[in-house]
Each structure stands twice: as structure tokens, then as C-alpha cells.
Image: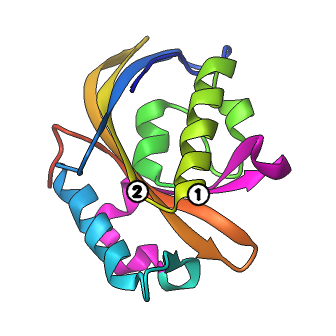
Amino acid sequence: MSLGTDIHPGHREIGYDAIEAQEPTHPKNRQLLEYWRARCVGGDVAPRRDINPLDMPALMGGMFIVEPVDGGTDMRYRLIGAANEQRLGMPFTGRRFSECYEPKMAAEQIAIHNRVMDRLKPVVLRGNFLGVDMEYARFECLYLPVRAETGLQVFGGLYDMAQTD
């Protein structure tokens, strides 16, 4: 799978391209994956109540939690780490994908999140960001399904491949 598009007009435009990978290679995403797996019980996905970002303070800047809205036709960031908001140059927490991204990128990201929730399996994307006033950056994003009291959500991490500590 190869993806690529830009952030919503009126914000810094950020192009990206990405491919799907089998397993995360970034140490922080490997740690998130192990944390999530340790909370999966009896073949089910981890309950959201068992996911506490405060358990992993060194990873918090790249974490996110997303919930579906409008029957899964859009997604909302319930939480996105401050490091990612700072790096991407805009606030995401509390906002819908349709507010944050160009329609093509919003559709691609909504589809990935829905696939994670439909299949109840992790997804890993690895690729590159390039934007106005932003240097080229390699990234890895891990998407993990979690079961909240209100339904399924996606928990994960987006980290710069050059920053592994």
C-alpha cells in the first residue's frame, strides 16, 4: 500500500508517502506494541481502560487515541501527543480528520483506522513527511485497536525514525 497527500489548506502543507510494513522497527512503537499485546486477554483486543499513557511517559509525545464519529465516516483525535502537534505545526486533539487534512488524506486515514477496528489487528505505516518550513522526516506510525466502553478506538504512536530515544 502506498499513500500520499497534504494537510488541509490554511495550515502548513505537509506531503507524505507511506508503505505498509509487517512489524514496527522504531523502538517506541515496538514498546507500544508489547504494551498493547500484554493487555490483550483471551484473543480479544486490549480494553481502552487498561491503556494509560502515563505508564509510558517517554512515549507520550508521539501517542494518539482516535475514535470514530458519524458511523466511522470521520474520525476524531481524542488525544495526540504534544511532540506531534508541535512537529506538524497545528493542534489536533479534539479535531476531526476532515478538519485537519485534505479530503484525500482524510479518506486514506479514515480507511486505515476503520480497517484496524474492523479486523482488530495492528497496522504499521512507514514513510516520509516533507512540507513547507519543515525538513524531510522519516516516520513510522503504529495503529492498534482498543475496546472502549463506547465502542472501538485506535491507540498508537507516530515517531520520527531519526529520534529513537
Q: Which residue is mark 2?
A: 122
Sort mark 2 into few (<14), some (14-19) or many (20+) by Cα contacts within 10 Å. many
In the depicted structure, whether residue 68 falls above or below residue 150: above
Q: In terms of secondary structure, where does tag 2 sit?
A: loop
**Rendered location of residue 122, percent (x, y):** 40, 56
**Rendered location of residue 72, percent (x, y):** 75, 48
> For this rendering, which residue is in front, 107 or 92?
107
- Give the quadrant of residue 15: top left
**Rendered location of residue 27, percent (x, y):** 17, 57
- Residue 104 belongs to the span the image colors magenta: no
Q: Residue at x 60, y 55 (%)?
A: 118
Which residue lies most toward the bottom here? 42
Q: In terms of secondary structure, where does tag 1 sit?
A: helix
Nearer-N-terminus badge (1/2): 1
Image quadrant for the C terminus?
A: bottom left
In the depicted structure, whether residue 54 falls above or below residue 33: below
In this orientation, does residue 65 appear?
Answer: no
Q: Residue at x 71, y 70 (%)?
A: 151
Q: Which residue is mark 1?
A: 117
Q: Which residues are magenta?
A: 51-78
> For this rendering, which residue is in front, 69 or 158?
69
Distance Cα–Cα, label 1 vs label 2:
9 Å
Which amino acid lies under the numbered mark 1 shown in the image of this protein?
Met
Tell me if 11 is positioned left or right of 83 in this view.
Answer: right
